[in-house]
Amino acid sequence: MPKSRVISITNTAALIAAGAILTACGGGGGGSTATPPTSVSPPTPPTSQGPTWTQGVFEPASTFKDQCAAPRSGVDIEGNSFPDQQGTLLEELFWLRSWTDETYLWNDEVTDRDPAGFSDRLSYFAVLKTDAVEASGEDRDDFHFSQSTEAFLAARNSVGNPGFGASLAVLQGSRPRDIRVAYTEPNSPASRPVGGVVPFPRGTRILEIDGADVVNGFTTQAEIDQLNTILFSPASIGETYAFRVQDTDGTIRTVNLTTEDISRKPVLTTSVINTATGNVGYIMFNTFSPFSSEEEIILAMQTMQSAGVSDLVLDMRYNGGGLLAVASQVAYMIAGPSRTSGAAFEQLVFNAGAGNVNPVTGARNDPIPFYNEVLGFDSGSSLSTGASLPALNLNRVFILSTGRTCSASEAVINGLRGVDVEVVLIGNTTCGKPYGFYPQDNCGETYYTIQFQGTNNKGFGAYADGFVPSNSTANFGVRISGCQVGDDLNNPLGSTAEGLLAAALNYRTSNSCPAVSSKTVSTFVGNKIADPLELSPEAEAREFFLRNNRDMSMPE
Amino acid sequence: MIKKLSSLVAIISFGACQHHAQPLPAVLSDGSEETLNLLKSEMAAALDRSRVQFGAGDLTQSPVFVIVPPPLGPNETRSTAIPERYRLEIQGQTCFAVHEKSDARIELQNTPCRAL
C-alpha cells in the first residue's frame, strides 16, 4: 500500500475519533442542550486501520468481498443489483489475496506479498500467479488477466458484433504483410455474392483498404492500430471500406464491404464423402460457445449417423472452445454408449486445499459425464430436452487441428483418449490449455485466474504444451498418432483437395503422412498461443483466429 | 443458489406435509407469453436472479423445462455452465417447480398449471 493511502485511512480514523469526541460532548457549539454532561467517557480509539498482513495467514475471501474503494450503485445491464459496499483499496487487495489462496490452482506456488505494498488492484493481481514454466519453457500460467465487469457483461450479452464476417489468417504481420481470409461466416458481407462473385473466398489476400497499402503501408503505431480496428474490431455497423484483394489464382480485384452485426455459426460445413472403403463424415465445427452449438452439432452428427459413416473427420482447426457440456456431447456421439457408460468425460482438479469440493461453487466436485442426451441450451432448438443423442460408435476419429484448437476442443481429444478412442491428429500442435476458470467480479473488475485442470477418465490432463501429431518435429507436447500438415488456404474448407482433409483421408487408407515441407509447416508450427486471453474482449469476440497470429507491432 | 434452494426445500417440505394429494406431473395451463412470463418471474425470484431464460422445451406438452446459464463471455473457452433442469408438478391446487438434481420444490403462486 502506498504511503498516501495509509495517511488517508489514518486521517479518516482521526476524523472519526474527532467526530466521536464531538458527538460525545454534545456537539461543537450552539449550546442548545440545557443539561450539561456530567461525565464523559473517553472515546475508544480505533483498534484497526484495515486488514493487516501476516505472511501465510489468510482470512476468508468472503470477509473482503464487495468492499470497494469506489462502490457502484444501481443495477448492471442484466438487471442485477450491484453488491458493492464502501470499503478500501486495501480490502480489495486482501480479497484478491484470499480468493487466490482459496481458488487458484497453483496457490502453493504464489509468493505471498503484503498488499500494502501495492498501489492498485491490477498490479497486485498480476503477481498473484505462479512463475513456474513448462518443459517447453512456456509459462505454466499463460491465462491470468482481468477486464472491466462492464466490458465483460457487454460482451456476453451482445448477440453479434460489427464486422465483415471474415476470419483472417495473418501469415506475416510485419511488412511486407500477408493477411489472408481463413473462412467466412455464412450470409455475411464477406461471403454473400456480389454480382455472382463471393467477396472473400478462403485464401484471398488483402492488399489495400481504401487505397492504403496493407502490405507495406500503415507504418506508424496509430496507423497500425487503425488497421487492426478495421480488420478485427470495427466500431459499428454500416462502415464501408474498399478492399483491393488478390485471389489464390492471382486475380486482383476491388470489393466494397459494409460492416454488419455478425454472429458466429458453430457448424460451418457438413458433408459425407463417399469412398471405396465406406462413407466418411466431415464436420467443420468452429465454436462451442453459443448455445446454438448444441443443436447444430447434434444435427450434424445425426446426418453422419443417417449416412452410416465408418469414419469421421472433425475439423476443429479454428475452434477455440466454449461449453464443456457440449464437448462432452460431441465425445459421446463419436464414441457411443458402450465405451462411455459410467466413465468420466472430464474430472476437474482443483488445488489441494479444495478436497472434493469445487472451491468456487461450493458444490461437490463430481466428474463431468459423457452426456448422452439433449441438455436444452437453445430455446429455439428443434430438439427436445432429454432426447437421446445419436451415436456413431467409432473407435477412432480424425481431428483437424492448428494452434487455434483450444481448451474445450482439446477436452474432446483428451476425453476420447480416456475411453480408448483413437484420436488421429491432422494439422498442427493444439494450443495446450487443459485449464479453466470461473470469471469473478469484485468491485467492477472481472478477474480470470486458473482454477482447475481437466483430466480424462484415466486421470490424464498434462497437455499444457498441446497435443502433437506423431511425425511433428516439435520437441514438446503430448505426441499422438497423426500427421503434421500446414493449414491449406488455397483450397476451400471441406474440399477433399484441402491439405488437412486430404491428409486425413490418405492416412485413413494408408496410415501414412504427406511429406512435411518447411513451407507448409511454417504457417502454424511454433505459433503456440502466447496468451489469447490478454486481448480486449471486443477483439476476442470479433476475431478469435487472428489474435494468435497477428503481430502488427512497431519494429524495434 | 444452492443455499437458497435448501432453504426452500425446508420451508416447502413443511408446507407439503399439509397437502394430502400426491404430486402429479403437470404442464402449463396455456402457452401464452403471459403465462411463460409469470413462470419466469417466479423462477427468477426464487433463484435470486433478475431474470431467467428458458432453454428448449414446450411446457404445455412436457413437464420438463430448463433454465439456461448466462451466455458465455468471449474468454470462457472451457466453461462448466450447464442448463438446470426442473419439472412442473401439481399437488392439490398448487403448482411446483421441482429442481431435478436436488429435489428442491419451488411453490408457484401465480403460474397456472394443470395435471398432465
Image (cartoon, coloured by chain):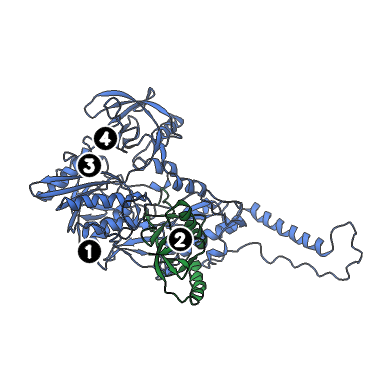
Chain colours: A blue, B green
Alpha-carbon span between mark 4 and mark 2: 45 Å
Give the image location of residue A130, x and y in percent.
42, 58
Task: Name the residue type under label 1.
Answer: Pro
Residue drawn 18% across the image and 48% down it: A281
Of callouts 1 and 4, the N-terminal one: 4
Task: Name the residue type under label 3.
Answer: Gly
SS assignment at label 1 = helix
Instruction: List the residue tagged with mark 4.
Output: A202
Task: Name the residue type under label 4.
Answer: Arg
Alpha-carbon span between mark 3 and mark 1: 34 Å
Alpha-carbon span between mark 1 and mark 2: 42 Å
Instruction: List the residue tagged with mark 1.
Output: A337
Q: Chain of mark 2?
A: A
Of callouts 1 and 2, the N-terminal one: 2
Q: Nearer the viewer, residue B107 or A336?
A: B107
Do dots 3 and 4 share one subunit? yes
Instruction: List the residue tagged with mark 3.
Output: A486
**Circle nearer the viewer, 4 or 2:** 4
User: Could one spot residue A57 in this view of the protein?
Assistant: yes
Q: Which mark is residue A110?
A: 2
Do dots 3 and 1 share one subunit? yes
Q: Vertically, is A488 above or below A334?
A: above
Locate residue A105: give its quadrant. bottom left
Of callouts 3 and 2, the N-terminal one: 2
Q: Chain of mark 4?
A: A
Quick one: which residue is furthest to the left in this view? A276
**Circle nearer the viewer, 3 or 4:** 4
**Circle nearer the viewer, 1 or 4:** 1
